[in-house]
């Protein structure tokens, strides 16, 4: 009996539609956007530029599997990230 409950629990846990890597991609993009928004009013320093390059690398690494994903699929996954 417990074996069946465990199997059902594992199946339900694996059915989660949330794509954690995609959520990390969104977060990395948001962090980069926040960092670069401040440069509408001022020029970035060398230190700022290094930080931006680090954030770009993090974003590119996190998003590398999603570069050719269609807009509808991206919106669905974004919604899944926001719901949890």
Image: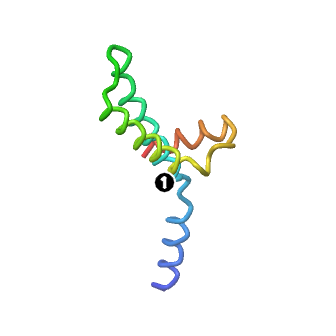
Q: Position of residue 71 (x, y in %)?
A: 66, 34
Q: Residue at x 55, y 70 (%)?
A: 11
Q: Nearer the viewer, residue 38 or 26?
A: 38
Residue at 38%, 16% in the rendered image: 40
Q: Position of residue 73 (x, y in %)?
A: 65, 41
Q: Above or below — where is 19 with respect to 69?
A: below
Mark 1 burial class by Cα count in 10 Å: few <14, some 14-19, many 20+ = few
In the rendering, at what x and y percent does residue 65 appear? 61, 51
Query: Total label count?
Result: 1
Between 55 and 22, the residue placed more toward the observer is 55
Residue located at (64% from left, 43% from top) = 67
Q: Secondary structure at mark 1?
A: helix
Q: Residue furthest top?
A: 41
Viewer-nearest residue: 68 or 76: 68
Q: Position of residue 60 (x, y in %)?
A: 52, 45
Q: Who is closer to the viewer here, 68 or 15?
A: 68
Q: Residue at x 39, y 36 (%)?
A: 52
Q: Quadrant of residue 75?
A: top right
Q: Residue furthest front?
A: 46
Left or right of 50, for residue 58: right
Give the color scheme: rainbow, by chain, secondary structure or one colour. rainbow
Q: Quadrant of residue 76?
A: top right
**Relative height, residue 77 to residue 42 (above, below):** below
Residue tagged by mark 1?
20
Q: Is residue 54 left or right of residue 80?
A: left
């Amino acid at each position: 009996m417990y074996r069946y409950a465990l199997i059902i629990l594992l199946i339900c846990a694996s059915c989660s539609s949330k794509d954690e890597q995609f959520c990390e991609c969104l977060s990395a993009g948001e962090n980069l956007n926040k960092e670069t928004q401040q440069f509408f009013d001022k020029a970035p320093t060398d230190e700022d530029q290094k930080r931006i390059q680090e954030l770009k690398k993090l974003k590119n690494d996190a998003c590398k599997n999603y570069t050719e994903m269609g807009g509808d699929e991206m919106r669905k996954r974004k919604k899944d990230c926001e719901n949890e």
